[in-house]
Amino acid sequence: MAIVKHGLPFKFVEYKWIRELLSYLNPDVKHVSRNTTVSDLWKFHLEMKAKLKHEMHHCHNRICLTACTQEGYICLIAHFVDDNWKLNSKILAFCKMEPPHTGHDLANKVFECLADWGIDRKSFSITLDNATANDRMQQILGEQLSLQNSLLCEGEFFHVRCCAHIINLIVQEGLKVAEVALHKIRESIKYVKGSEARKIAFTKCVVQVRGIDTKVGLRLDVPTRWNSTFLMLESGLKYRRAFGSFTIHDRNFKHCPINDEWKRAERMCEFLRPFYKITNLILGTSYPTSNEYFMQVWKIEWLLRDTLRSDDPLMKDMAKRMMNKFDKYWSEYSIILSIAMILDPRMKLEALRFYYSKLDPSTCD
């Protein structure tokens, strides 16, 4: 159990001082080899698998799936509410996926896994990242499950797009409007963090200009993850005056944004703040239930529609790009998410009517 819990190597049981300790605690102990440990752990794994299989098979509720494919591996996770109303999230498979990673091969792999666990007739939905292979995979998998007559509503709501991933695509599209300003801020932070001497010189500039809260340091982003770009933008804006001072002290520093670019970045930061909060709320680690999603996706649409009426051409262009992406992936988000919202005792139909009327009174009813 220690090996499982702490990720220890199997040869842990053969370490000299571990054996010394066990012998000290019990002189009659029979030491085991790592091969025996592997065998024991595999038996334990099979016992736990049989227990989970039995639990899912006898669970009265449907099971939702999430699948992730990356770097030649596939991970399949089951999410279900047990008879005690507890939300469970269990990894059913984490295995190597030999190429080619076509939609057909992925669908067969997932179906094999579902059949192995005995839940191929209990699946409700599958949540996937936006990728061509995944779109094809869910289509083929849906057809396989429909042949068994095991999908609700003839599979209309089987495919669910990963909310955090779609928000990333939407925001990345909007960020293209101000990529010059973003690039300068990114390069400025990279330049300062590039050597210890520059860090010291920059710290002196921070002290000199005064009034900068240094609790949050400069942050570099991962360009493909927009929430890290937001944090970089936020941290860069706090040190705006220090960068201006650093330009005077370091003649090699060429990337400092001009005043208009700082203002553009500031407007972007305020516009993206709600998106950042929504992303944090719905990240997979917190496992939010489906009734939480309608409000978050609705907020995104409302923000975009509101910004489309802005007098600022930059923000208007940004919202337009993002709205196009939104419509492409979430034009029908309201159908299934609104059902979950109606089932939430805090919301019901009245709340739904209110939120729809905010978007478009003419189509509310």
Image (spheres, rainbow, N blue to C red):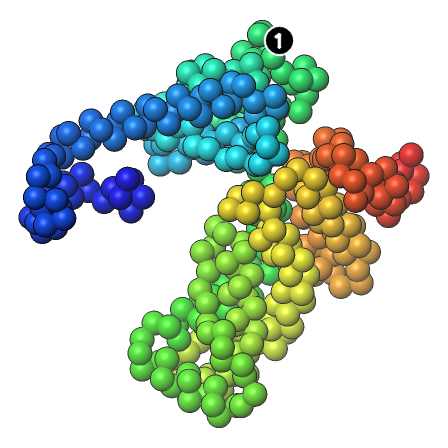
Question: Residue 314 in the image: x percent, y percent?
Answer: 70, 61
Q: Nearer the viewer, residue 333 or 173?
A: 333
Q: Estimate the x, y position of residue 224 in percent, counting from the top left.
A: 48, 50
Name the quadrant of the C terminus.
top right
- In the picture, measured across the screen, residue 119 lies left or right of residue 23, that is right
Residue under the point 50% across and 83% down: 242
Task: Provide the secondary structure element on which disc 1 rests.
Answer: loop
- Percent across and percent down for residue 172 are 57, 50
**Quadrant of the image for the N terminus?**
top left
Q: What amino acid type should be assigned to the residue bearing mark 1?
A: Asn
Extreme-bottom residue of the structure: 208
Please say if 10 is above or below 204: above
In the rendered image, the vertical position of residue 362 relative to residue 132, given as above or below: below
> Visible in this render: residue 108?
no
- Number of numbered discs overlaid on the protein picture: 1
Pick whichever, 298 or 152, lies toward us.
152
Q: Position of residue 132 (x, y in %)?
A: 51, 29
Residue indicated by mark 1: 149
Residue 157, visible in the rendered structure = yes
What residue do we see at 58% from left, 36% from top?
A: 86
Q: Quadrant of residue 9?
A: top left
With respect to residue 21, does 64 lie above or below? above
Determine whether, in the image, residue 72 is placed left or right of residue 40: right
Q: Is residue 279 above or below residue 215?
A: above
Q: Residues within 10 Å of mark 1 (few under 14, many from 20)?
A: few
Which residue lies at the image location 70% right of the left edge and 47% below the top edge?
296
- Residue occupying image coordinates x 61% and y 24%: 61
